[in-house]
Amino acid sequence: MPRSMPDLVHEDALGGLIAGVDEAGRGPLAGPVCAAAVILDRGMIPVGLNDSKMLSATKRNILFDLIHAQAHVAIGWASVEEIDALNIREASLLAMRRAVEGLAICPDTALIDGNACPRELPCHGVTLVKGDAKSLSIAAASIIAKVARDRVMAGLAKAHPGYGWEVNQGYPTAAHLAALQDMGVTPHHRRSFRPVHNILLSQVAQHIDSKK
């Protein structure tokens, strides 16, 4: 059975001005988490708009530009330091709130991907599990967040070659984990994430042993 495409059913049910909100980068070992908020123009919805995970990188980049040109868009970030201080869930919600707050116009409702709503939103918030596959507004936000974060990681990869961030975006691939073991932890790694934390502990233990 073919997979259904996202639509505007949830936006229509809510009524008013709707901002779709999604994040990218919860799972990586390195880099910030990114969130996007998008208010679509019902008369100018880009053709082929879909959940970012269902699109090629080329298609995502094309839609990224089209969404920016045809919709109200804002991006919010939470840093590696905030991720380590708050935990990734709370940092992701913080990035989502920042994205909604960054919109040039305040929506009536923020339609949030997932099951948790950020605190202190400037508008009403409604959650939608797997919303990027159901809502066109959230699908648009998923594309913006994904492409924006991928571009940041590609930039960081130039400053820190060898970890493969230009292709793995900081996710714990075998190549990334091997590079962590060989080259160590960078300032862009999330120290609260277990693989990074364990390497740091191992380095401390080795340093102690060397002093004996």
Image (cartoon, grey):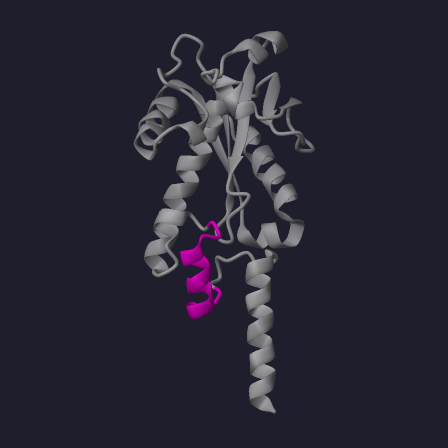
Q: Is residue 37 above or below residue 163?
A: above
Determine which quarter of the picture holds residue 73.
top left
Q: Residue at x 44, y 56 (%)?
A: 174
Task: Name the quadrant of the C terminus.
Answer: bottom right
* Along the line of sight, the residue nearer the viewer: 105 or 117: 117
State whether residue 63 appears in this view.
yes
Residue 59 position, x and y percent, is 32, 28
Q: Residue at x 56, y 82 (%)?
A: 207
Residue 53 position, x and y percent, is 44, 31
State whether residue 191 appears in this view.
no
Q: Is residue 3 above or below residue 24?
A: above
Q: Is residue 12 left or right of residue 52?
A: right
* Along the line of sight, the residue nearer the viewer: 18 or 59: 59
Magenta stretch: give its range.
Answer: 171-185
Q: Is residue 172 magenta?
A: yes
Q: What kind of secondary structure does the magenta stretch mostly adopt?
A: helix
Residue 128 position, x and y percent, is 62, 23
